[in-house]
Amino acid sequence: MFKKMARALLDKRHRGGMPLTPDILEGAWPMMVGDYLASHTRPVRLSAGRLEVVVSSAARMKEFMFLRTELIRRINLLLPVEITDLQFTLARPDQLPATAPLHASDPPLGEVPEVEQALLEGIEDEELRALMTRVRRLSRGRRR
């Protein structure tokens, strides 16, 4: 639903002769590429079918280059103009936050049933017990 609304707004803006500025693109960026990629990238310029994107690190740039075709497809689903090329460049310190999060948001955590909780409490190593509890809570949260 949000993607349809964003597409309609971007299309209306484009048909009205207003440019798709980097600020406008950045607002819709997470919907285009997903939270994980958006947390490590920023669109900076759109010109003649080429979208320039800054990336937080060289390792991420290499990772995203492998996704280029899929990213172009995702972006074209939302933009009223066709993107034919993505150009990745390494971000300057002022273009992205100093440390991008590993995950855009924490996954949901579920409750561990009493039976499992009793088993977990039997683990003597505190660090291992905490890790196993988190794994069980993550698995429960994803089932919701």
Image (cartoon, rainbow, N blue to C red):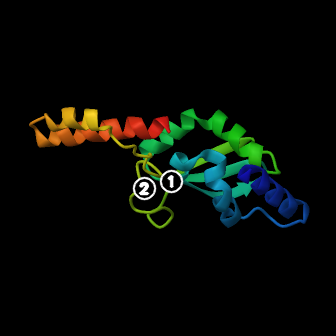
Locate residue 71 relative to residue 47 in the image: left or right. left
Q: Which residue is mark 2?
A: 100
The answer to whether residue 133 is seen in the rendering is yes
- Inspect the image, locate mark 1, and give the three-letter code of the amino acid beneath it: Ser
Image x and y of residue 23, in percent: 66, 66
Q: Callout 1: helix, strand or loop?
A: loop
Residue ID at (48%, 61%):
96
Image x and y of residue 29, in percent: 64, 54
Q: Which residue is mark 1?
A: 39
Q: Nearer the viewer, residue 9 or 24?
A: 9
**Looking at the picture, does residue 85 appear above or below residue 92?**
above
- Inspect the image, locate mark 2, and give the three-letter code of the amino acid beneath it: Ala
Image x and y of residue 113, in percent: 32, 37
Asked which quadrant contains residue 100, the reply is: bottom left
Q: Nearer the viewer, residue 117 or 49?
A: 117
The answer to whether residue 83 is seen in the rendering is no
Report the Cα–Cα distance between label 1 and label 2.
Answer: 6 Å
Q: Dot 1, crowdedness within 10 Å: few (<14), some or many (≥20)?
A: many
Tags 1 and 2 in contact by the CB under 8 Å rule?
yes
Q: Callout 2: helix, strand or loop?
A: loop
The numbered mark at residue 85 is none
Q: Nearer the viewer, residue 122 or 50?
A: 122
**Looking at the picture, does residue 22 appear above or below residue 110?**
below
